[in-house]
Image (tube, grey):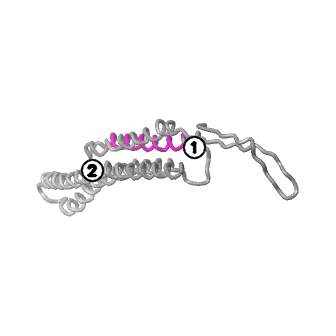
Amino acid sequence: MIHYKVNPTCQINSQNSNFSCVHVEFLFDRKYSLYIIQFYIPSSLICVISWIGVFLDPHEMEARVSLGITTSLSAIILSFMLNQIAPLTAYIRIIDVWLLFCQGLVLSVLVEFSVVNFLTTHRVLSQINQFVLPYVQLVGFEQWKNHQESKFLAQATYKALIVDKIARFLYPIVFASFAITYWIGFVYFLVQNER
């Protein structure tokens, strides 16, 4: 509580009677430091940690999957923690918007990994099988197969690296633009409510 004001000389007059009253005004201030330390900073760090996956080699599937799943679960746990300590409301709170955005960004890193994984594995195998099966009986099949595998693998890896390079710039830009918009809107909302 920041301030209170008591007005003991309050009078309520009605047609039939006269009442004395006490008029008290309380001014409360919400402390945002708990939310900033326990939710905003950790969720931002979880988003940044999830971006590490786009800097890994496309063939490092285990590392990318474990990093993506760990950060996704961490973002979901933050939402559950918020629901434990914050009062339940029938509307979407401003911190819910932030946490949903962070969860969406972390999950989009997993989707990006799926695209890269598809480009580097499934596409290569399907194209090799498409060209290999008709020529099974040919002499020198192994040489041709090895040449085609390396050619398709190089093309698919190149496309996967392009997707990763785009993601390396896109994720920080999207996060920074949302964070700037969010905090400007949040401060504007606070200033409007104090008036």
Determine the residue located farthest toward the front in the rendered image.
9
Magenta-span inclusion, residue 63: yes
Name the residue tied to disc 1.
83
Residue 24 image label: none
Q: Earlier in the sequence, mark 2 or mark 1?
A: 1
Magenta-span inclusion, residue 128: no
Task: Using the numbered discs, state the Cα–Cα distance from disc 2 to disc 1 in whole angstroms.
Answer: 33 Å
Tell me which corner region of the image, top left, top right, bottom left or bottom right, holds residue 81. Answer: top right
The front one of 72 and 66 is 72
Name the residue tied to disc 2.
169
Q: Which residues are magenta?
A: 61-81
Q: Is residue 192 left or right of residue 165?
A: right
| Residue found at x 27% / y 59% | 126
Categorize mark 2 by other alpha carbons within 10 Å: few (<14), some (14-19), many (20+). Answer: few
SS at circle 2: helix
Residue 51 at x, y = what percent? 33, 44
